[in-house]
Image (cartoon, rainbow, N blue to C red):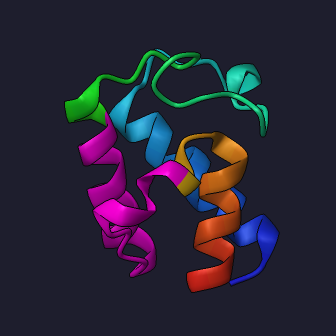
Amino acid sequence: MNQQDARTAVQAAIGQVAPDVEPGDLADGARLRQDLELDSLDFLRLVETIAGSTGVDIPERDYPAVATVGGLVEYVAAHG
């Protein structure tokens, strides 16, 4: 999966899980838990939504790598 497809998938998944997050808040450096205010349940739903839409499973050991919007995009692009 290329970067643009991964970014689109991540933005769509965040929009489903946290519809109140503004698209302008989705800068690469934005931290999912702190900056976008996703709680642990929201984060798990985001991981499940990504898996459902892209087929990319993110194991718990890789959660630190996907702590930011950019990290999540990179991970999905690399594994999709």
Q: Which residues are magenta?
A: 43-64
Instruction: Answer above or below: position of 23 versus 14.
Output: above
Q: Is residue 6 visible?
A: yes
Q: Position of residue 48 (x, y in %)?
A: 27, 59
Q: Residue at x 79, y 66 (%)?
A: 4
Q: Residue furthest left?
A: 41
Choose top left, top right, bottom left or bottom right for residue 16. Answer: top left
Inspect this view and state whether residue 80 appears.
no
**The quarter of the displayed image where residue 58 is located:** bottom left
Query: Where is 2 relative to 52, above or below?
Result: below
Count the labels in the image.
0
Q: Position of residue 35 (x, y in %)?
A: 58, 16
In this rendering, the answer to whether 72 lies above or below 35 is below
* Above-or-below relation of 31 to 14: above
> As rendered, which of 10 and 41 lies closer to the eye?
41
> Is 1 on the left-hand or right-hand side of 54?
right
Percent across and percent down for residue 7 are 70, 57
Q: Is residue 60 magenta?
A: yes
**Residue name at image x 20 percent, y 33 percent:** 41
The residue under the point 61% across, 68% down is 75
Q: Quadrant of the C terminus?
A: bottom right
Quarter placement of the N terminus: bottom right
Question: To which quarter of the image does residue 63 belong?
Answer: bottom left
- Percent across and percent down for residue 53 are 40, 70
Residue visible at 79% across and 70% down?
A: 3
- Near-viewer residue (34 or 55): 34
In this view, the residue in front, 20 or 77, is 77
For the stretch drawn in magenta, the main secondary structure is: helix
Q: Is residue 59 left or right of residue 25?
A: left
Is residue 18 highlighted in magenta? no
